[in-house]
Amino acid sequence: MEFPCQSFDIWITSDIIVVTMYIIRPKKRVGDKTYTSTLLIEGYREHGKVKKRTIANLSKIPEKIITDIEAVLKGASFIQKENLKPIQGKAFGAIWVLNELCRALGISKVLGNTKNGMLAKLMILAKIINPSASRKAILSWIKDQAIEEVLGLTFEFDHYDLYKSLDWLENQQEYIEKKIFSFRNKTKKTVKIILYDITSSYLEGVKNELGAFGYNRDGKKGKMQIVIGLLCDDDGYPISIEVFHGNTSDCTTVENQLKKLKKTFEVSDVIFVGDRGMIKSGQVESILSEEYKWNFITAITKRQIKKLVKDEIFSLSDFTEEIKEIKYQDVRYILRRNPIRESEIRESRNKNIERVKKLAQHKSKYLAEHKRAKPEVSEREILDLISRRNLTKFTECYRDGRKIYIDIDDIELRKVEELDGCYTLKTNLDEKKYATEIIHSQYKDLSKVEYAFRTIKTGLLEIHPIYVRKDSRTRGHVFICMLSYFITKHLKDLTSSLDLTLSYTIQTLDRIQYTMYDISGHKFKSLPCQLTIDQENIFSQIGLKLPIKI
């Protein structure tokens, strides 16, 4: 019976190896010294052309074994198959590619080769390849990963060492962020547009030093949370991340970011972009103050829009699908009505109205069938639903005996609908340098921060669950997620032309494993000489090739 040996394309028939390969010994001169390598080469045809590829580097194998292999390649038959023992190796592809991207982005250099730096990098890569793994779970995961071959992790460590690395990472965060920012600016135009947004993330337990009850964006009732602020450049690459107590309001986080941009990142000319909950009058004053003298782009609330309409600064008829600009007191307002969003809002509102009406019918039927039930209780439930669905302004709930009725005020409903799909941007940028369309586009770039949060929280990287308790370790954990996103964002950009999800891309790379061969007690490792089509396409897009030697 015949069967192939995975990495060499060697066919074993009975007890004899039959191959069509050869060994070469290329020389390389470095200074006054000449180095000789021993490589196992395979010849093959591609589109009618004869080509060759390196199968393995045999330089470390004793000359006697190499001589025996070479003799077999030339037709000898004295190496028995029991002397060639292929052993399944560890996952190599994903961790190697991500480590190479770390180098390209300057992350490896700034983390350094200390124990804490190396363990920090391990946690960053683990967060990408195995996002749900806890610190303890990482210790099991690495058993099948080529961390020694790729990362040089030859020392022993436990989960306590990983926790200490989180403490170290939090302490070094400002330095690391500054160095990465500086490295990126060497290969990119100077960052001027800064995108900023915040989110919240719920906690497991109540002992976290930063945990507090606040406005929960995760919909997790009864859970404490932390608030996270993220600064990104105009391409959506993260610059800095900061963790606040869970009851911190949006706008109060802005001052920290302004100081950080000026003092840490030494940015002198900024266009600060944030949403309507972020940049209010107090924050605008700070941005325009003598300390900064920067520019801003934000949106205003519906209440502010109504006031400007009432003051006749602009009218409802100015809101159309086409972007329109109105200037008032050195402030530029950009107006638009999004018809798609308008339709979505009305459809959602109408569904909520129907939901309230059905609940009223259900409760009326229930009260009719259950004479001991209290109508006041059912009425409170309906009023609570009306409040939660923001229907109070035009919806009235009243009771006649044991029947509950819902009345919709059409006039008030029309007033509410007037601003459906409408939004207004506000900026102090010079109209001679920044056209209306550019400002509109730059504000829409906030979606890049939102995408980053989705990836970090519920997408690939899964910041949840957060089990750490200490302040420093919470910040270190979140910083790990930011650096992981930085790498995956780069990988996604490089492979954007491929119709592959980021998760599939990483899983596909992680399936590349090396094979270990034991020839008469001498071991060497070899990577597969053939990859799948998707793997080849990924390597082509990112501009990397698997190493010849492990």
Image (cartoon, helix red, strand yellow):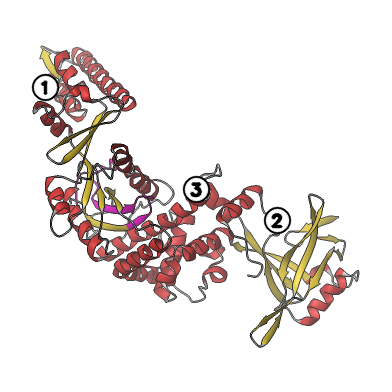
Tell me the SS state at disc 2: loop
Residue 529 percent across, percent down from the top left: 71, 59
**Neighbourhood count class around disc 1 (C-alpha, 10 Å): few under 14, some 14–19, many 20 upward:** few
Decide if residue 457 is in sight here. Answer: yes
Disc nearer the start of the sequence (3/2)? 3
- Which disc is residue 530 wearing? 2
Q: Earlier in the sequence, mark 3 or mark 1?
A: 1
Q: Amino acid at mark 1?
A: Glu
Q: Residue furthest bottom?
A: 32
Residue 158: percent from left, percent from top:
43, 71
Magenta residues? 212-239
The quadrant of the image that shows the C terminus is bottom right
Give the amino acid type for the residue marked by disc 2 in the picture: Gln
Classify 10 Å Cα crowding around label 3: few (below 14), some (14-19), many (20 and above): some
Mark 3–mark 2 distance (CA, rounded to whole Å): 22 Å
Most frequent secondary structure within the magenta stretch: loop
Quadrant of the image occupied by residue 373: top left
